[in-house]
Amino acid sequence: MSRSLALLITSGVIASACHSTPPRRPGEEYLASVKFEGNKKIKSSDLLTGLALHRAEQAGRPADPYQVTSDASRLKGQYQREGFLEIDVQPRIERKDLATTIIYKVDEGTRSMVKVRIEGLPTDPALPYAAVRAAMPLRDGAPFVYQVYDDAKLGVLGVVQDAGYARAKLDATVEGDLPTHTAVIMLRFTPGPKCTFGKIVVEGVQGEMRDAIINRLHFQPGQVYSNRAITKTQRDIYGLNRFSSVQIQPDPGDTAQVDIHVAVSESAAHQVTLGGGFGIDPLSYEVRGRAGYQIVGWPFPLDTVTLDFRPAYAYLRDGTGYEPRVRALAKLERQDLFFTHAKGSVEAGYTYLAYEAFTEYGPEGQLGYEIPLGTQRVMLRLGYQVQQYSFSHPSVLVDDALQKQIGIDHSEFLGAFKQALVVDLRDHPVEPRWGLYGELQVAEGGTFAGGSYNYQQIIPEVRAYAPLGPVILAAKVRYGQLTGDVPPTERFYAGGASSNRGFAERMLSPSVTGPVNGSTITVPYGGAGMIDTSFEARIPIASIKKMPLNGVVFVDGGQVTDTASQLRPQQLDWAAGVGLRVLTIVGPVRADFGYRLNHTGPMDPEPLSKYAFHLSLGEAF
C-alpha cells in the first residue's frame, strides 16, 4: 500500500515539475488568472473546471472578450442546474502591465425548491398518480438538481408505458417561479391508447434454441403491454450465454396492438483459454498453468462441453523437494433440462494436490441439477458426488496416530448426496450495495450412496449488505458441522483472503507444530466444526483512470475444531485490519492486511504469528 501511494505521489511531483507555461513573446498580453467573488454554494475549483478561459490561462494565451462572455453564461448554467434560478454573474477585467485577471462576481440568489405537477394521466386503476410521482425522486420542497430530474425522465415515462400505454409521450419542462423561489417540474403526458402485445416474431435461430427463447418470453399476445416484461425477457435470453446480441423491438406503429420482433445473433461456439502464473502459499512456491476449451451447442443446441486442465509445479517450502500438481475436469452442461431455467450437469475429473498435511490424488465425478423455485432469486441445487482418493507424502509432523485419526492411512471412497437452497436478494452479485444472501448446504454420505463414509454435513451461511451514505456495511456468518465418519477431503479449514484475514490460507484450523529441517512449521489438518464471521465497511476513496478505489476496515472472527461440539462462539479467534480495492472490469483487485487480536500463543492456531497480508481477486464475501 505504501509503495502504491509513493508511486502516485512521485507521479504527481513529476507531472508538476514537467508542466510549464508555454513561452510568450516580449510585449504579448497574457491571462494571469480567473477568480470568483461571492460564490458560497459552489467551490471556486468546481466553477473553474470546464471554462474556456481556464484553458487559455494554462496555455499562456491572452483573454478573448468572447470567451469572457460565454464563460459567464457557462457559470450561470452551472448554477441553474443546481437550482439557483436567480443566479447573476458579472465579469470584471483587471490589468497590470501585460497580465490580465478576469474576476466573476457571483450573486447566487436563493436556491429554488421543487414542486412537481403532472398532467394528462388517464383515469386507470393500473396507473395510480402516486406510482408516477414516485418515479421522480425529487421530492416537493427539496432543492432542485437538474441532473437528478433529467436522469429520472425516462423512468417516469416507463411507469406509464408499463401500465400498457406503449405509445405514451412525455413533455417534461422546468419552469422557474422566481417570486416564490420554486422550480416547477411539469410532466405533461400524451398517453395514447392502452395497448396489448400482438404478434411475436423470433429470428436468428431455429429448433431447440428458438423454443428456449419462446419459453423465456415474459409476455404473450393479448397481454397488457409492458416495457418491464421486455427488459426481463432480454435479460433471460442473454442468460442462455448463447448470443452476442439480443434485440427486442416493439412495432413503431400507432395502433393499440404492439407487435414484437425478437432478433438474436449467436456468439462464437468455440472458446480456447490459456494462462499461467506464479503463486506463494504457506506450503510452497508454485508455477501454474491453465488450458481450457469450451464448445457451446454441442452435442445438442442447449448443451455446453467444457474441458479445464490446470497443471502446476511446486517447490515445497519445507525443503523436501519438488512435486507436480494437477487438476483436470470435463463437464457437460444442459440448459432447460425438464423445465425452463433448470440446468443439469455431469462432471468427471482427476486431482493430484498437495496440502500441508498430505497429498491427495484420484478420480472424481459429480451429477448436478439446479432449478429456480418460482423466481431466479431462489435456487434449489441437487447433486451426487463420488470420488476415490488415495493419500501420500504425509508431513513428517503427522505421525501414524494422527494419520489414522484424520483418515489418511487408507484410501477414501466417498459417495454422497448433496442439496443446497440459495436465496439471493442482493442488488448485484459481484459488488452488492444492499440486500441479503442466504445459503443452506446439506450432504449425506454412506453405503446407500455407494461410499464407505457414513456422515452428515450442514453448512448454513448468511450475508447482509446495507448502505450508510457512500459507505457500504457488509457482514457474513457461516457455520459448518460434520457428524459421523469424517472424510479427509471434507474437513473444514478457515483463514485466508476469504475467511479470517489475520491468518494465512487454511491456517485457522486444528494443526500440529514442530521442527522440520531446522525450521518450526505448522501443519493444519482441518476439523469437523467451524464458525466463520466477518464485518466490514467499504469506503470510497478516489478513482484511478476511472476505476474506483475503495478502502475497507474489517473485523473477522472464526474457529475450527476437531468436532462440532467443541465450538465455543465466545472464544473465537479475532482479527482486525484494513484493505484497498481497485474495481476493475474483471472484478475487485484487493489487498488486505489483518492483525490478530487474541489467541497468539504457542498452543493456538498458527502459533506466534500476529498478522497476515493477502492479495486476491474479488470481494471477501
Image (spheres, rainbow, N blue to C red):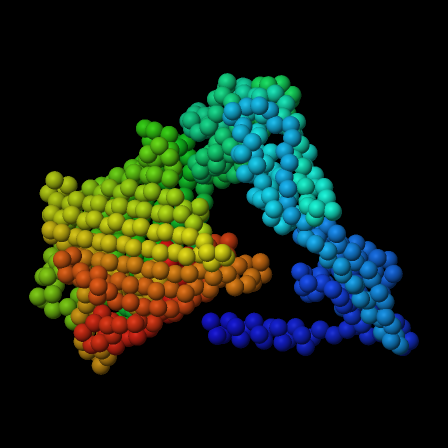
Above or below, 340 against 43 in this view is: above
Q: Position of residue 307 (x, y in %)?
A: 36, 46
Query: Residue 126, can we see it?
Result: yes
**Viewer-proximal residue among 148 and 377:** 148
Q: Quadrant of the C terminus?
A: bottom left
Q: Is residue 348 visible?
A: no
Residue drawn at 61 percent across, 20 percent down: 193
Say whether residue 53 is left or right of residue 531.
right
Residue reaching furthest to the bottom: 518
**Along the viewing direction, whichever of 542 and 120 lies nearer the viewer:** 120
| Residue 220 in the image: above or below residue 6 | above
Query: Which one is nearer the viewer's eye here, 296 or 405?
Result: 405
Residue 589: % across, % down: 45, 60
Image spot of residue 247 (x, y percent): 56, 32
Q: Is residue 59 above or below residue 266?
A: below
> 261 or 543: which is nearer to us?
543
The residue drawn where x is 17% and y is 70% is 512
Q: Residue at x 60, y 48 (%)?
A: 142
Q: On the rendered structure, is 334 left or right of 97?
A: left
Q: Residue at x 28, y 41 (%)?
A: 421
Left/right of residue 204 with respect to residue 192 in the rendered view: left
Residue 60 percent location from the top left of the image: 81, 70
With 567 as the anchor, is 557 left or right in this view?
A: right
What is the quadrant of residue 101 in the picture? Answer: bottom right
Image-quadrant location for residue 390: bottom left
Outermost residue on the right side: it is 27
